[in-house]
Every structure is written in C-alpha cells, then in structure tokens.
Amino acid sequence: MLTVEGLQVSFEKTPVLRGVSLQVGEKEAVALVGRNGAGKTTLMRAVMGLVKADSGKVTFDGKELTGLAPNERPAFRIGYMPEDRRLIPDLTVEENILLPLWALKEKEPEKKLERVYEFLPEVKELASRRALQLSGGQQKLVALARAVIVGEKLLLLDEPFEGVAPGLAARLAEILRHLKEEGISILVSESDYTHTKGLTGRTYLLERGEIIDVRENEASG
Amino acid sequence: MRRKDRTYPILVGLFLLFSGAVFFTPRWFSFLLTVAVARSLVVLGVVLLMRAGLVSFGQGFFYCIGGYVAGFSSNAFGVTDAGAVVILAALGAVVAGAIVGLLLCNYRDIFFAMLTLALSMILYSVIVKNPALGGSDGFNVPPPTILGISPEAVDPRVSLPLFTFAVAFLLYALAHRYFLSGFGYAGLALRMNEIRLEYLSLSARALVFLKYILAGVLASVGGALIAYISGHVDPELAYWTTSGEFVFIALLGGTGHVLAPLAGGVVFEVIRSYAFDLAPSLWQMVLGVILLLMIIFMPEGLWSLTERFLERKRDEAAP
Amino acid sequence: HAGGTLKVGVVTFLSGAAAGPFGVPAKNAAELVVDALNNNMVPEPYNTPGIGGKKIEMVLIDEAGSATQQVTEFRNLVQKKGVDVVIGYISSGHCLAIAPVAEELKALTILFDCGTPRIFEEASYKYVFRTGPTATIDSVGAARYIVDLKPDLKSVSGINQDYAWGHDSWNDFISALKVLKPDVEVKNELFPKLFKGQYGAEISSLLVNPADFIHSSFWGGDMEAFVLQGSARGLFDEQTAILTTGETAMFRLDIPEGTVLGARGPFGVYAPKSKLNDWFRSNYIEKYKTPPTYPSYKMAQAFFGLKTAYEKAMKSSKNPTKEDIIKAFEYLEFVSPAGKVKMALGKGHQALQESVYGQFTKAGGKPSVKNVKRYPPECVSPPDGVKSLDWIKGGMKGAKCD
Amino acid sequence: MKPLLETRGVTKRFGAVVAAEKVNVQVREGEVVGIIGANGAGKTTFVNIITGYVKPTSGRVLFDGQDITGLPPRKVIRKGICRSFQIPQLFPDLTVEENLLVACTLLNRPFGKLLRPFHDGKFIERVEEALEKFHIKDYRHEPAGTLPQGVKKLLDIAMAMMGKTRLILLDEPTSGVAIDEKFPLMDTIVRSVGRNGTTTIFIEHDMEVVEHYAERVIAFYDGKVIADGETSRVLRNEDVVSFITGSIPTARREPADADS
Amino acid sequence: MREPLVILLDGLVYSSWLFIVSAGLTLIYGVMRILNMAHGSLYAVGAYTAASVVGWYFASGYDPTLSYLVFFTCAAGAGVLAGLIIERGILRVVYGRDEVLVLLVTYAVLLILEDVIKLIWGVDAYFAYQPYAALGRTKILGIPFANYDLLLILLAAGTGALLWFGLNRTRQGKFLRAVIHDREVSEAMGINVTRLYTATFVIGSALAALGGAVTAPSLSVVPGIGVEVIVIAFAVVVTGGLGSIGGTLLGSLLIGLTRAAAVHLFPRGEVLVIFVIMAAVLAVRPEGIFARVKARKI
Ligand SMILES: Nc1ncnc2c1ncn2[C@@H]1O[C@H](COP(=O)(O)OP(=O)(O)OP(=O)(O)O)[C@@H](O)[C@H]1O
Ligand SMILES: Nc1ncnc2c1ncn2[C@@H]1O[C@H](COP(=O)(O)OP(=O)(O)OP(=O)(O)O)[C@@H](O)[C@H]1O
Ligand SMILES: [Mg+2]
Ligand SMILES: [Mg+2]
C-alpha cells in the first residue's frame, strides 16, 4: 500500500531523516518506534506532504504522492492524526470530525459518522461541544475519530495513545485491530510498545533519522 | 556560542563618524542625518515594544508630546536649553505613559496597536481643535541654547546635530544595556508565551506597562529633538501616518539589535529623499516597491545583512 | 540665453487630496509660464526673455508629507540642488515651518498660495515674500458680499473643515459679519473632520435649523462632495451657500443657481480683463483643456512678481545680488493676469489684492457668474502692522470701501 | 499535622460541564501523590485551580494554612508552588538554554533587580546543571519550538523546577516521553525534589509509573474524587478499574523490558 | 421630537456606509490574519472605476436605471481583478511570515496603488453624481433624504446577511474557520487552502471596491479618498471584534449612530467620537464586542 523509499528530510541543512525506507502492506499495521527526536513525527509529516523532502519517494496504492499538495492526499483515503491534536477550536466536535469528508465533497457523511460513533461512543457524547474546551485526552480522541472517518485505506497515527487513560487506550488498540482486519493499513508511531504490541505486524525502529531495526511481531494476527 | 559583544565601541565609533560628518559632508546631508538619527530614537522605542510582541501604531502620541514640550518650553515658559528640555520631554512621557499605560497594559496584538493609534489620534484632534495649542498649523520653535551655549556663540547647524548625536547614542547605549538585561529577555518571553511568563512569577501587565513608558520616553526625546531640528511643531506629529512610518522603519531595520533602527532610519531618509528627487510625483510608488523588495528578500530587516555577513565571516574563519 | 540660468524650486502638492484642486493646476501654470517666458512668448509687460534674460530652470518637488519632511526637502532644494529661488507651499502649516528655515539659509522664498495671515503678523522675515493675498480678504469679502446681497439677512450657518484653515475662515467671517450685522443669528457651527466626504448628518443638521446663508470654506473634494450631497437633498433650495473656494469647481460641477462663489482674490473668472489675462487664460485652456483656476493664477502671479523684482534690481546692477532683489521686491507693485498687485503689508513682503465675489449662474447655458462685486484691498484688509483678527473684531476701523 | 495543601469543597463549572465537584483533598508536606483519571475527568482543572489559572466556582484552596483561592498564578508561584504543563509551555523562538535561563532568572530574581545583565554566571551554572539532569544537553542551542514532543516535555518540566519550590504539580510529566526515558525522568524529578522534602503531585496515565512512584493516589472521575489512598489499594479499587484503568495492574514492567 | 429620529436616520445611513466599507477588511483579517492596509486603495479603485463607468454610461445616453447594475458590476470586477493581482502576485510570497511583516507588505501595496491610481486616473476629480440624484428624494419628518442613501441601508443589510450566512451556515464557511485556526492541519484534512485564501482576499477586495462604488455618486472622487477610509474602517472592525461580521455590524451601528448624534448635538466633539467609542468599548471588552473564542492552551 504505502511505500517510502530513501526519504531524506532536513531542516536548515541538518538532516532529520536520512534515507528512510519502509512499507505498509494491505491489511497491515506497522509501528514506528523511536526515542524522542528520532524523526517519527517528521516522517509522518513528510508522508502527508507537510514538510518537503529533499529526496526520496512516497508511493501509495501504486501512485506517487511526492509532488502532490497536502490537501490532495485525503482523496486517497488517507487519514492523519497529528501528534499535537490540532482541532479547530470554534467548530463543534462533530464538525471537526466531518471536516475532511466535507472537503472531499462526500455524499453522505452522516453514515460514516455513525460508524465512527459506534467505535467511539466517548466521542459521540462530546459531539455537540466546541472543541476548544476539551481536555487534552478528549481532543486526542476527536483527532483520532477525524482520522478514522476519512482513512478508509491508510491511517497515519502519531502517538495516538499518549495522554489517553489506560482503560481507554486498551480499547483504542482494540478498535485499531478491528479496523485493520477490515482492510485498513495503519502506520502508528509510538515511543512505547505497550499498546501496539498485539496490534502491529511489523515494527520499524527509528533512531536519529535512520531505520536501525525491523522486527516482525509474532503476536500479529 | 555567543558572539563577543562589540556594541559599545561600535556606538562610540559611529558617534565620532556622525559627528565628523557634520563638518565634512554637505549641509543638506548632515541635516538629513540628524533628522534620521532623531527619528530613529522613536523607532528604537517601537523596536523595544516589538521585541515584546507589541506593535504600537501610536508612538506619534509621545513624539508629539516631546515636540510640544520643546515648543512650549521655549515659547511659553522661557526654558530654552535643549538639555533641560530633553529631560522635561522624558518626564512628560513618563507621566503621560504612566496614565495611559494603566489602560494599555491589558491589551495585546492588534488591540494594543489600535488603542495606541486611537490615543494618538485623540491627542491629534485635541490639538487641532485648540487654537491655544497652535491648531493644525502648529507653531515655530526657535533655536535652543545647548547646555548653556547660545545659538549666537556656536552655529546651531553644528551644535544641534552634535547634541542630537550625543543624546541619541547615549540612549542607544542604554537601550542596548536594557536589551541584554533580565527585562530585555523577559520581553522576548512575553511575546512568545504569556502563560509561562505568568507561571515564572512575572506580571505581564507590569512588564508591558514598563516597556510602554520606556518606548514613550524614547519617542518623546526624539520628538523634542525633531522640534528643534525642524524648528516647527504641528499636530501632524501625532497623526497615525507618522506613527505608521515609525513601524515601517522599525521593520525596515529589523528588531535584532539596537543598531537596527539606526540603520533603518538612515536608509529610509536617504531612500525617501532620492525618491522625492527622482520621481516627484511617483515617489510613493518607488518607496513601495523598494519596501516590497526588501520584505521579500530581507524579511529580517536590514540588520539581517550584517548577521549574514558575520556568519559568512565565521564560516570562512572556521577551517 | 546670454544671461545663464536661474534655478527655481517649485513646491506644490503632486499627490494627496490637495493635488487635484490646487497642486496640479499650480504646477501646470508654472510650466506654462516658465515655458512662455523662456521662449519670450508672454505679452506686455513681460515680453522680455526669461527672468532678467536668464533662462528659468524649474525643479519640482511634491509638497505632500509632514512639516519636518518639507523642511528637509527645502534644505535639499537650497543646499543640494542650489536653487536661486523657491516658489511654493499651499499648506499654511508648511509656510509657517518653512519661513524661518528660509531665513536661516538666506534663501529667497516666495510663498504663492497659503493663506494664514500669521506668517507676517507674528514675525518679520527678510527672505520670505508672499505674492498672494491672505485669507482675511476671503472672509471679510464674503461677509460684505452677503450683506450687500441681502441687507435684511437674519441668520447664517457655517460648515468648515476641522483644522486651522476651517476654524480661521469661520472666525474671521463671523466676526466680520457681526461687525456689519450685530444681531445676526448663528444657526449651526459645524466642523466635520477634514476629508470626511460624507456629510449626511451635517446636511440634516443644516436642514433642521435653516439659515439664510451657509458659509463654507471647504475646498477640493470635500467642497464638491458637500455640494453634490446638499443638492441631492435640496439643501440649497431655500438656503444660499457661500463657497469661498467655489470657483475651482464651477466648470465641473452642477452648482446650484445663485450660490455665492469666491476665488480667494481677483482670480479665475474674476480676473479683470487684460491682454495678459487673455493670453494666460487662452493658452492655459489650449494646453490643459480646462480653464485656469485660482491656484494657477496665484502661481503665475508669483513668477511675474519675481520677474518684476529681479529686473527692477537689475537696473541698479547688472548681476543683482539677493539683497538687491529683496530691496526691489519690498513694496513692489506689479501686474499679473489677475490685475494689479501691491506688496503692501508685512513690511513690503505681503501682497494685497481686492476681494471679489459673485453668484453662480447657468443662465446663458454656460457656467458663469453674476452680481459680481469687487472690494478694494483697503476695504477687506487691515492696514500694515495690524493683526487681522484684532482689526476685524475692533470693527474694521479704517476700511476704505469705495 | 497541618496539611501543606488543602482544598475545601472546590467546585468548578464550565457552563454545563462540571469539571470539579466538591473536591476535598489534603496533601501533607513531603508526600508524593499521583493523580489518575479518565480523560476529561478534571485533573488538569484541579491543578489549574490550585495554581490560580482557573478560579473555582466555589470552595477554597489553602496552602500552608493561607487562603490562596483566586490568587493569580504569579502570586501563587511566589509562595513556592510550581507546575509543569500537559501541553508544554515554552518560549518557542528562544533556544533551550535561553528558555531555562529566562525561567531561572525570573524565578530567582526580584522584579526590581531585573535590570541586571541577563547572562549571569550564577544562573548559567544552574542552567548547565538542569541541561545535564534532564538529558537535553544535545538540544541546548535549538529553538524550543522545533523540538521533538518528548524533549519539549522535558524542557517544560525543567523550567518549572528552576525556582525554590515547596510543592510541585506535574501534569502528565511522562506523556510523550520515550519509554526508556520515563523512569529516569521520574527518578530525576523525585530525586531532585526529594532532596529538600518538596511535596510532589503528578498526574499520570501510565499506571506503572504511578505504581512505582506514588505513595498515594487520588482518582478522579467526572469531576469527583472517587478514590483516595494508598497506591496499591486505589489501583485495585473496583470503580477505578472499571472507569479508569481497565485492569488490575499485573507484573511490574521493567524499563529494560522494552528492548528485550 | 423630530431631532432624535433624524439622528437615527442619519446614523443608519452612515453606519451602512461604514459597514460596507469595513466588512471586507474584517473578512480578510478574520480568515487570513492580514490587516489589509491597502483596503482603502481598493476602495478608491472601486470609486474611480464607478465614476469612470458612470461618466461613460451617461455620456452614451443609455437607460439610466440600468446604470446601477453596470457600475456596481464594473467596480466589483475591478476589485476582483486588483485583489487577484495582489494576492497571487504579492501576498502569496509572504504567507506564513510574521503578521506584522505581512501588514507592512500591504502598506507597500497601498503606496504603490495610490500612485497606480494616479497614473490611470490622474489627479483631477471624477464625478458620478447622476445615479445619486436620479433616484430623487423622500421627505421624512419634513427633512428631505436622498433615496439613494436610504437604499444604502438595504444594501448594507443584504451584504451583512449574505456574509453572515456564508460564514456560519455553509461548508465553505466552516472550512474558512478551520483555515483561520490552523492552516496546516486544514491542508492535511484535504482543504484547498490556497484557493480559499485567494477567494477570501478577492471577495474582501471586491467588497472594498463595492464600498467605493456605492459611495462614488455622492462624492468627488479625488486622490487620497482611500487613505481616509482605512483608519475609520479599522476602528469599526476592532470595536466590533476582529473577524466577526456581526461585530462589524454592531461596531458600525455604534460608531455611526454616535457620530450622527455628535454632529447634531455636540458638533465639536465629532472627530473624537470614533476613537472615544472604540477606547470605551475596548476598556470594557478588551477584544471587541464579539471577541474571538480563544483556544484552550493549558
Ligand atoms: N520545523 C523544524 N525545524 C527544525 N528542526 C526540526 C523541525 N521539526 C523537527 N525538527 C527536528 O527534527 C528532529 C526530529 O523530530 P521529530 O519531531 O520528528 O521527532 P519524534 O521522533 O517525533 O520525537 P517525539 O517522540 O518526541 O515526538 C528533532 O531533532 C527536531 O528538533
Ligand atoms: N476552559 C474550559 N472551558 C470549558 N470547559 C472546560 C474548560 N477547561 C476544561 N473544561 C472541561 O472540563 C472537563 C475537565 O477537563 P480537564 O482538562 O481538567 O480534564 P483532564 O482530567 O485533565 O483530562 P485529560 O486526561 O484528557 O487531560 C473536560 O470535560 C473539559 O472539556
Ligand atoms: Mg513526535
Ligand atoms: Mg489534563
């Protein structure tokens, strides 16, 4: 599904990603693990086109994404959850979630919304509240919902479990597993294995902008 | 690594250079230089606020106060010494700044900008409406004595620029000292994150209040000097376009260093003078185009040129 | 040109709101006159080439900007460009600021248009002359005219711009009127912001409390907007407006019949018939496709004054010094397209001219003026050494009107 | 013994949302208290109320016997309370080093003495120490705005701890911090505050961290305190398990576990 | 008792003008965070275009009733064109830079536009009075009012309603709000930010030009008319709360009515009124009447 080849990104001449290559296959969940500053976020942003790559190629579903504007990516059914939540504060939770579908001029967004609410009843409870007053973890959930609603083929989740209460985090992992089984590819970054352990089939270990290790998880199902 | 700070010797050097210019360059040039230096003091105040994230579109308020203090001191109260008047102008700014600062310190961003603008426009309309203050035409300010030296003894065309440079460079040195102090950095912090600042036990309002007054003092002193230099004051000093010009010069120069406003001020006066000369009816366009090009290619202001230069030198020095 | 060149700096508004009504007509006149003088095309008494045989070289500067900036530019003109004479300044504030600088630089300077009497009433200058009359004659003339027009007038309203010119004009006018008609009633005293452009509320106010006359010293776009908006709302149906600068708009705007128009002196349509005037008017119209208005006249007047003084000075020395020219200029009498000019006030530095008013009419199909009245200088102006407002408030003593 | 911090019936409503309801908490000097709770339970609001960022709708906050309800943060800070933030609050254009230096200067120098030069040797030493302690030396010259999330977090905590503190409140100190940094970070915090008996309250979602460091746990749910007491007891509390943690903690995970 | 009613009417007319003139400014600021100093120049472009078109139209002797449509369209068209050039040609280069810097860019644009206008139209006054006079007048309470002015009130109300609907009730409006808050994440959500920015700026410019066009018939169109408009439009927008259409409406009403009252009752204070009102409103509500909601930061 998603192939990243030799991705190179630098900020003001300092390389942050040095030739990263990875793959996420169909119906596969892949984890990206690394310590702080390893470049996980940068990698995700590069895939979304939010930072410019010096070189390297990103292809999805056989099509090259590299030259496209960021806003052309959701059309490929890629959902992105940024690490720092970034909801639109004066829209309601529901509007926040629907935003990508509206941008895609989706015919019946409500149907998809119902499905997301089914997975995440916590979010449904918040539906009519404005995003600006949510607590940190609540915002995280909404951001996840927003990614899930459009990401019917690929989800890019940047540290989705961070700051989420443990009970809920376990449920989120469960939901992600379910989504994967439905055929969605998932790339999830974490500094922690706890939540992804049972979820991901492969783990890329990122350090100082390089993949230093790839591990196949036996626990994958 | 922090670079070694050579600002003070540079200031002394510039003072000598500028003073020399009074004797060795054509009169019109040394006059232009004097105007630029006096006005750059106001810009320095704008920069001081800008470093704290506050854009004042109303420095004309203090600029005008300074000018009128100078005007009234000589015309109505017989205080004709420039040294005394500069101090009076500074005091005037402290008093005025303390009063309106109490209101202003609650505002940030565009609201701060617009309120300062409103204040200066209120002052403008008060003067315009008041014949006792000279109305919209203003009035003339006779040449001052300078630290006791009368204009008859020493040609004011020499003494006034020298005095202006002395005052300005002294204030520049003080401002530099201020930028390097705790307050200077607290200002930078204020711009970036007020919540954290509050949690570092500093009152953002007190800081804004203080900075507003300091910037006001600089503007007021600049205004008093300009009153003597141009020999005339009018309410135009408080008009919003005047203040706008100061912001413009501030951005032209940059906010990275105390000397940036000076660079901006001199370059601005020269450009404008030439634009007036070469294109008497299209000088605005010339100015606008130059401004645009500068912003696009030099977003950090003129000062960034020196930074780039120093960086290159350092790169070269490194093996 | 055997005699070399004479460099003249010309300063007038080339941008901003004052450019259209004043600055550019003045600039046009300067170009016309300089060109004609250099080519010796001007009729008598100016049918000699250039100024004292010298070719005139003009350096043009925009008057826009603050007083400080004007001072800087003035210095540039004198010290950098080395002009011999500066002719310029429409804004009174600029005139006030420039005069002492001219004195300091010993630069011969002719103020051509600004009106504030303060310049020579509050100080005396050696190097500064003003070849146009002060604003006093506009206001006193206007007061005299409406009293002549309607001897039983009961009330007036005033609408003037909120700055020195507007306030001074109204003060002079109402003080003079009160001398002539002590029990005249003031219905409205309005001072809208300069360049406001929207006078809806003011017009309502004038309509709610109507008066016989509405005095206005509005100029340029403000005056024209006021006339447009007032006409549309019938403001001038019952009340007559006195527009002291109205002449500038009379060929462009549909001015209500009977409106009293001033030209700040015997300029424009009020200029007396003469060969010089015919030449000026027809050449101006030919070149710029529009009749010259008062700023054009006043600019031409400044050049002719300079020429007269310079050539008079040449009688005593072939190459006159500045001092020679100044001596010749003081108390000079010369003619301009607007008739006779006397440098009678301000120790011979301030010109004196008659004040003329008339009423707009389209009776002949073409815009023109009727009921024109001319008030001699001594009728509308204080004697030398007396301040204008003091003179008016003191009952305009010594005015000679016939 | 008199509690160092006490809240009496603190209630906070945001419109229809009740973020704190009659919260009564007492914390003794020197205690290390963990706060857990579901998302949106009111943990951050609780800290906000104590530090004066949010004014309670009703109730009192007492610190060292003094009523500090409604004091603005800067005054609360001066009493010796400091906090870190769930979303790091940094000065993004200043470098890491400068961030710390600003914090150190402002917390330790009275307003009147701020005219002294900013680069003061005494403070530079302390900054050096903090850079070392929090393992952020490598980033010292980088502007704070572009730091990786985890490093931002570390810097935020380091800044909070630059002053003299009697009570430190940490809002999710380890969230976003890499797995093998969590325990060292908590060690650093506890060690450096433990030295002078500082009271510590930290909000945390990672139960292993809570178990390891907290002597006592307060559990929030829906604005209310649903459990308060000794750590292992609270973590086994039925309500806590069903509303917050989802499971009873099992074997303790060792930090090294991640690499095996 | 008729004076208060006259004041009300005068105030309404003036407020309508204020609103039309400021709406574009608040829209552009609200969405793009650009305080567009060139707004006044765009207003002038509209006024000049309208005046030229009206002059030509009436000189050609076409049906006067259609003139309104023609000159509104032409002026708005000129605004769209100018807006496109400014946005695509200049602003695009500086997006993402500091707010103040972008403000300066618009100041440069203002300087340039002022002279461009002078190059195109010269410095002489232009008139377009025919449409103003042609609608006649109505006597209300014995005071004649120009019907044109009264229609202005309707136009302002219509513009306001349209803008409000567009911003609050349409998807495009929601997109705008997303972009206002977070440009980057909006892009990641599939919103075409570039297009939205262009559209906003062009609409804002067209509104400015329209403001000039509707004013032109009652004015003499001269150099510098635009510069005067900026400050007052800023004052209105800030009083109402930046970026809020409802706020701008309220700000216009507040300032317009007080100003009319001042002209009638206390003419000498008229100039001060705008700024005093603004300062007073800000003293009570530091972010304007309709303050923008702030995101939670802690
Ligand atoms: N805009 C930027 N400018 C300069 N440097 C940047 C920028 N964004 C990221 N970096 C640098 O890139 C490196 C990688 O950062 P990134 O945010 O990708 O790390 P991460 O793996 O996501 O870390 P974390 O787990 O803490 O979120 C860091 O050293 C960071 O300082
Ligand atoms: N300023 C505010 N305005 C309105 N509602 C608010 C505000 N601050 C917090 N809330 C609401 O109060 C509740 C408690 O929020 P709080 O941030 O304290 O939760 P939390 O326990 O810290 O959650 P998390 O673990 O997700 O950070 C939430 O429902 C939140 O939406
Ligand atoms: Mg990251
Ligand atoms: Mg929280």
Image (tube, rainbow, N blue to C red):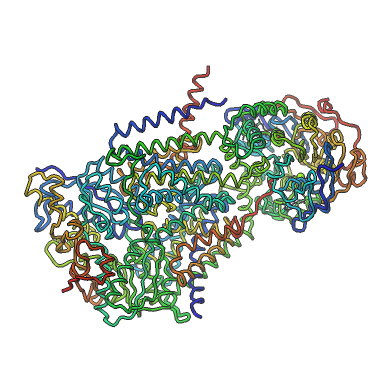
Q: Is residue C82 above or below residue C275?
A: above
Q: Position of residue C134 (x, y in %)?
A: 25, 62
Q: Is residue D228 left or right of residue E289?
A: right
Q: Quadrant of residue C233?
A: bottom left
| A154 lies above or below B312 | below
Closer to us: E192 or D45: D45
Q: Is residue A115 visible?
A: no
Q: In the shown orientation, is residue C215 left or right of residue E283?
A: left
Q: Residue furthest top?
A: B319
At horizontal 18% and vertical 69% (from top left) the residue drawn is C376
Which residue lies at the image location 60% right of the left edge and 36% below the top edge? D113
- In which quadrant of the rendered view does residue A164 lie? top right
Residue A192 position within the rendered picture, expressed as x and y whole percent measured from the top left: 79, 33
Q: Is residue B222 left or right of residue E185?
A: left
**D45, above or below D90, in the image:** below
> Viewer-proximal residue, D147 or C76?
C76
Query: Number of marks in the image?
Result: 0
Residue B31 placed where, x, y %? 32, 40
Which corner quadrant holds the N terminus of chain B?
top right
Residue B104 screen position, x and y as percent: 55, 51
Query: Closest to the observer: E8 or B203?
Result: B203
Task: Return the residue nearer the eye: E298 or A77.
Answer: E298
Is A179 on the left-hand or right-hand side of B104? right
Answer whether residue B192 is visible to the viewer in this image. yes
